Structure formats: C-alpha cells, structure tokens
Amino acid sequence: MAAALALTLAAPAPAEEVTGRFLLETHDGRRVTDSSFAGKVRMMAFGYTYCPDICPTTLATMAAALDLLSADEAAQVVPIFATVDPKRDTVAHLKDYMAAFGPAFVGLTGTPQMTDAAARAFKVRYQIHPPPGEARDSYLVDHSAGIYLMRRDGSFAARLGHMAGPDEVAARLRQVLAQ
C-alpha cells in the first residue's frame, strides 16, 4: 500500500492543470504574486509549520538540493513554502520557521481565501481537522505533498513526489534552469 501511495504522489500533474497563480504575503510582510518571482526558477512546497513530518522533511530536501547546485545555479532558484494553515502560520511565525532552512527561503501566507486560491492553482488538496474540545490551536492538516518546479516565466515544469531525494531535485532543477 505504501509503495502504491508513493507512486501515486510522485506522478506529475498535467501542466494544463497547474496554473501557479497566487497572491500572498511573504514572511517579511510584503504582498507578492507569482509574477513577483519572474526570471527565477521556483521550487515550491505547500504545507504548514506545525506539520510533524512531511513538511520539515520536504523543506530539508529542498535546502539540500540547493546545496548541490553551484552558487550561480542556486542564485537563479527561489525556494518557496506556502502555507495551507494561515490561522497559525502568521507572518511572524513563518519568518522564524523559514530561518531554519536558509536565508533564500520565502514563506508565504495570507487570508484563508488567498491561501485556498493558491492551493487550488497548484491542485493542492488539504483538509483541516478541528480538534475536539478546548484545544482549538492543536490540530492537524492533511495535505498533498510534493515539490513543484516552475519555470522562469512561471509556467509549470514538474511536480516531484515527497519521497524525491536532494539529488533528484537538484537534477530536475538543472534541467529547468537549462530551458
């Protein structure tokens, strides 16, 4: 079952389904859109900072992939983490969280409507599970996992499954950089 799930998650999303459009706020408090990153290759993941496993692992993989690139190659890539939990992932909270992965990382948040629209543009599914009782800020969020690679013009290049290793991510980044 786990192998079948990994294969399902690793299947690339059709380019016509992923628009990559968004209007969100960075962890530094600036409003940005997908076109704010024009000219850069985008390596993006969706999730939430309270995620116990997949999100920090994915971000660590992204950081390791950047380390495998030359300085010139890495300078052409912007690593982005977009939240699907804007209630807890405030600008200030994202700023602290992003610092753990490197200075190039950009954390994105916004209103629930903004983050939902961004998730839809990438075909990311998520569901917040409200906790029972009084623990209102203690909940989990089921969400799609993977790394999206977007070309310099913002068009969809690839979606790598959450099990992709740094070597595979770096190799795919080099392919997109060469386009």
Image (cartoon, rainbow, N blue to C red):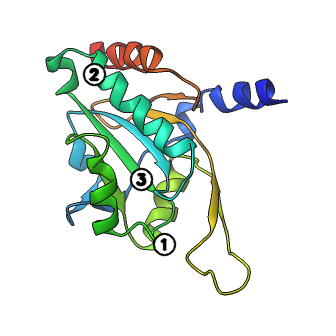
Query: Where does residue 121 sit, x and y in percent of width and height?
Result: 50, 51
Q: Position of residue 153 (x, y in %)?
A: 29, 34
Q: Nearer the viewer, residue 87 or 111?
A: 87
Task: Tell me what residue is drawn at x 60 percent, y 33 percent.
Answer: 13
Q: Quadrant of the C terminus?
A: top left
Q: CA distance from mark 3 to mark 2?
A: 21 Å
Residue shown at 76%/32% (left/top)?
5
Front residue of this view, candidates 86 and 139: 139
Location of mark 1 (residue): 112
Sequence-first tag of 3 and 2:
2
In the rendered image, which residue does mark 2 sit on? 67
The three-letter amino acid code for the residue at tag 3 is: Ala
Of residues 154 and 169, the one nearer the viewer is 169
Q: Earlier in the sequence, mark 3 or mark 1?
A: 3
Residue depicted at x 20% and y 33%: 39
* Badge 1 element: helix
**Label 3 belongs to which residue?**
82
For the view shown, which residue lies furthest in the bottom direction? 134
Q: Which of label 3 and label 2 is nearer to you?
A: 2
Which label lies toward us, 1 or 2?
2
- The answer to whether residue 59 is above or below residue 3 is below
Q: Residues within 10 Å of mark 2 (few under 14, many from 20)?
A: some
Q: CA distance from mark 3 to mark 1?
A: 12 Å
Disc 1 to disc 2, how far (Cα)? 33 Å
Can residue 27 be seen from the camera position used here?
yes
Could you tell me residue 66's position as x and y percent?
Answer: 29, 25
Please provide percent x and percent y for residue 64.
35, 25
Mark earlier in primary sequence (1, 2): 2
